[in-house]
Image (spheres, rainbow, N blue to C red):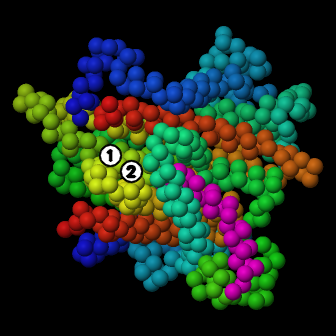
Amino acid sequence: MTAFILRRLMALPLVLLALSLAIVGLLQTLSPAERAAAFVTNENQLRNLEAIIREKGLDQPFHVQYWNWLREVLRGNLGFSKASNQPVFETIAERFPATVELTLFSLFPILGFGIWLGTRAGLNKDRFIDQFTRVFTVITNNIPTFVLGIILLVIFYGLLGLAPGPGQVSPENQVNLIINPIPRVTGMLSIDALLAGNWAVFWDVLHHMFLPVITLSTVITAGMIKVMRSSLIEVLSQDYVRTARAKGLPERTVNLKHARRNALIPVATIGGFVVLGLLSGALFTETIFAWPGIGSWGAETATRFDVPGLLGFALLSGILTVLANLAVDIIYALIDPRVRFD
Amino acid sequence: MSAVSAAPSAVQREGFWNSRVMRRFRRNRLAVFGFFLVCMFLLVALFAPLLAPPPPVGNNCLRDVGAATTAEAITPTSSSFWRLMFAAPASCYQIARINFSQIPSPPLKPIQTEVGEVRPLFGTSSGYDVWYGIVWGTRTALKLAVTVVFFQLLIGITLGAVSGYFGGWIDNLIQRLIDVIFAFPSLILVIVITSLLGKSLSYIILAFVLVGWAGYARIMRGEVLKTRALEFVDGARALGASDWRIIFRHVIPNSLTAITVIAVLDLGAIPLTAAALSFLGIGLPPGYTDWGQLISFARAWIQGTAENRLEYWYVSFFPAITIILFGLGWNLLGDALRDALDPRER
């Protein structure tokens, strides 16, 4: 198992190398002046494009440029992001916790509601709750994240006035946080506020998080319900479930202990998709709700031709994806005794 | 797999409409609804020039098809009508901009322009005619979907079949390439490629194709590995057929079932991803007829006025409902197709 994990982790640098090669290669289709535009932050530099081209070696051959870039990255310098107006590495360090926060809170509806409703539907196949669930998943599965975000905003912010404004905290708490900063232990504002005992900020962040979490989790919850339902229906027709019933075990024990536990195995395998979905969804959710995570930053790097930022964002998502898939394989082996790694 | 190879003869005997697959498909009411929705969108795309005729003011479509008036452009006897139908110039894919007013104008409210009064059916946002954007946006969506899926299938099926059939180093090479593509969320790869290349429909198509063929190739490879082991392939080889003949005439046609379902689902998903990108401001140039842009206009008009909190409902409602129905239609169709083609479900 350790050998398997190490082998998978060894593939990670290769994958990142391939991606960065592809991106730097893609950049070669642009002229040096166009590439220099990525580094322009003020008017003076615009008049002096030649200097930027020379300084950054943008007119050098491809392999030289790539080597220059790689050397800097290995030194821990990912470049300067125009979109966030600070170095890429610091941007990621500062913004990543907010995305993790949103993702963590999204896991509650995905796992809780998804598994619960999927189980109810699977146990009551073709009865009312199953039909209701089917309609619910068909509808929620087909609303793209960015459309759902807008719809929720129109209803809860525009019409009902229940939702707070954009961002992570309201302006007054933002000011409070500057005057009385709380120690940033995890970087996640809600959890840090909780640790510091600052209830006002904690509730404020939860309030701000409500719509983004629903937006981010809805599509994935629908997928979760579907997988849970079909997996449970399949398990319920297995011999050992019949045996358990024949032994005279109570219906509840059979359903929850024998059937649901085994039905959860395929659910764990879609965990990788969940992480990917959350990562992609964060781009839209964070942009719509002005959530200060890496999603909104990533979207901005793309619209503002912030090449170092975009590269950093892409590399980060590559690392996360590989790690998520690895985690899924490990979990799979832990919960299903039939799976063995050689 | 035996069910798949038996299907052609069953179709010949009973006719397509009464084949097992079609009977199962028709029984599924949701599938029929999905099929209806998809047909509706196809018709809207086809008859876009009649549903949202090129306006006298707002874009240069009328000039570029060589018509003097809107009425002339949609007369079936004129040459401009046929150009609009099958070879619409690029300017027709610019959302008609009625004025430069920032404030949205509600559906059917008359607006004064230099050529007289117009009443946009779905209102305007940022001065753009929403109805025109939705109707011609359907064309953009389907054009994009069909082109992308065609090229993805072409590359994916060929490389997947080659990979599975020959094995060895070529298989290894293709599979490692796929591993790299799979190591990233496809949405993020598409974003990286389009934002580096610039804003244009052809760059979006390129980005989707570069990222999307890998999924087809992997499924195809698995199917080919299964199919290759069947007797009829040995039979073909015994009769002296070449490798390429076996791949294209025997292995690929018998491995297409799984691919078909994914392709149908992709036809619905790709335009939505493109719309999502253009919502962020990546991909298509500003003013291009595309649903994502219409939604992004709506971001500024979430809040109504104090008297009417839903004052600007139409700005987000029409594009949103279009996008949802489009996704719903293709998804229902794809799911139903999967169920109908699944040989295990009898």
Find residue A270 and report its image quarter: bottom left
The amino acid on which the numbered mark 1 sits, given as a three-letter code, is Ser
The chain holding disc 2 is: A
In this view, the residue farthest toward the left is B238
The residue under the point 60% across, 26% down is: B40
The residue under the point 72% across, 33% down is: B132
Find out whether residue A207 is within the magenta segment: yes
The amino acid on which the numbered mark 2 sits, given as a three-letter code, is Ser
Query: Is B16 left, or right, of B92 in this rendering?
Result: left
The tag on residue A231 is 2
| Residue topped by disc 1 | A237
Q: Whole-percent x and y of residue B247?
A: 21, 35
* Count of numbered circles on the image: 2
Query: Is B340 left, or right, of A107 in this rendering?
Result: left
The chain holding disc 1 is: A
Which residue range is magenta in the image? A197-224
Query: Is B100 left, or right, of A39 in this rendering?
Result: right
Closer to the eye: label 2 or 1 = 1
Q: Is residue A190 above or below residue A243?
A: below
> Does residue B269 appear in this view?
no
Q: Whole-percent x and y of residue A119?
A: 47, 53
Q: Nearer the viewer, residue A57 or B123?
A: B123
Q: Secondary structure at mark 2?
A: helix
The residue under the point 25% across, 73% down is: A1
Cα–Cα span, label 2 and label 1: 10 Å
Q: Whole-percent x and y of residue A211?
A: 68, 60
Find residue B8 and report its image quarter: top left
Secondary structure mainly formed by the magenta segment: helix
